[in-house]
Image: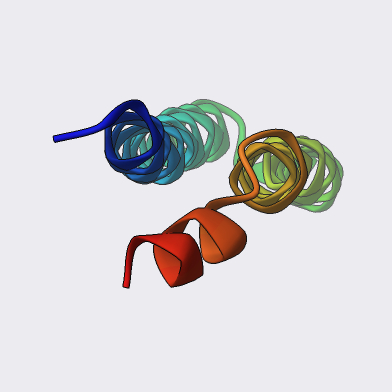
Amino acid sequence: MNSEALIAASTMLAFGMIIAGVAFGSAVGDGIVASKAVESIARQPEARPNIMLFMFLGIGVLEAFPIIGIGFAFYIFLVVANVPSLVAHLK
């Protein structure tokens, strides 16, 4: 195994870990926000419209992080490590 193969393999592993991390983190965050919103609505049903508004704002902000993480992962994958050219060079 030469150094180019090692770089390609570690970059692909890092890419997968970043994608899995942002997906897991976003799912946990969405669950927490939604559960707290349901809990708040159960305590104060008359504030439902206001709580729902802030819940959707929170989820919207929370969903920006996976997009940023995916963009960062693709940047590392394609620009920093230039994995497609490394893989083509290994053939």
Q: Please, which residue is most extreme toward the left here? A: 1
Report the front residue among 13 and 30: 13
Q: Is residue 18 above or below residue 19?
A: above
Q: Is residue 36 left or right of residue 48?
A: left
Q: Is residue 90 above or below residue 66?
A: below
User: Residue 56: horizontal and vertical position, in percent?
Assistant: 76, 51
User: Residue 8: horizontal and vertical position, in percent?
Assistant: 38, 43
Which quadrant does the C terminus fall into?
Answer: bottom left
- Colour approach in the figure: rainbow
Which quadrant of the view contains residue 2? top left
Q: Residue at x 49, y 41 (%)?
A: 30
Q: Residue at x 13, y 35 (%)?
A: 1
Q: Residue at x 34, y 61 (%)?
A: 90
Q: Is residue 13 left or right of residue 63?
A: left
Which quadrant of the view contains residue 59? top right
Q: Residue at x 54, y 28 (%)?
A: 40
User: Residue 75: horizontal and vertical position, in percent?
Assistant: 74, 44
Which quadrant of the view contains residue 39? top left
How many numbered discs, if any? 0
User: Residue 62: horizontal and vertical position, in percent?
Assistant: 69, 36
